[in-house]
Image: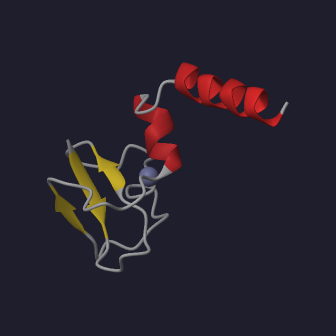
Amino acid sequence: MQYYFFKKRSAAAHIWTGTDTACRMYSTGGMRKSGKVYDSHGARRICSMCKGVIGYEKPSVNKLELSDMTLYLW
Ligand SMILES: [Zn+2]
């Protein structure tokens, strides 16, 4: 998978689909075009909108984590 991000390490990495970011911020002008496409996300956090678009994280995993947390709290 390819990623689009800026040099700044605190910036999130967007998932690159080949012509646009998965969240479409690139083509809609929602972000500067001074970033680059990389083959790795470089340990950056991934843009949550991009993740949602391509199903990077399955919702069931989050639910599991949530129920584990609830069990722990109780
Ligand atoms: Zn994104």
Residue 41 coordinates in the image, percent (x, y): 27, 56
Give the quarter of the image for residue 60. Answer: top right
Describe residue 50's horizontal placement relative to residue 16 as left or right.
right
Residue 16 coordinates in the image, percent (x, y): 27, 48
Q: Vertically, is 63 above or below 21? A: above
Q: Vertically, is 20 above or below 4? A: above
| The one of 63 and 19 positioned closer to us in this rendering | 63
Give the quarter of the image for residue 42. Answer: bottom left
Q: Which residue is at 40% across, 31% downward?
A: 54
Residue 38 coordinates in the image, percent (x, y): 17, 59
| The one of 20 and 52 positioned closer to us in this rendering | 52
* Quadrant (top left, top right, bottom left, bottom right) of the C terminus: top right
Residue at the left extreme? 39
Q: Which residue is at 26% across, 53% downward?
A: 3
Residue 37 coordinates in the image, percent (x, y): 19, 60
Residue at the right extreme? 74
* Quadrant (top left, top right, bottom left, bottom right) of the N terminus: top left
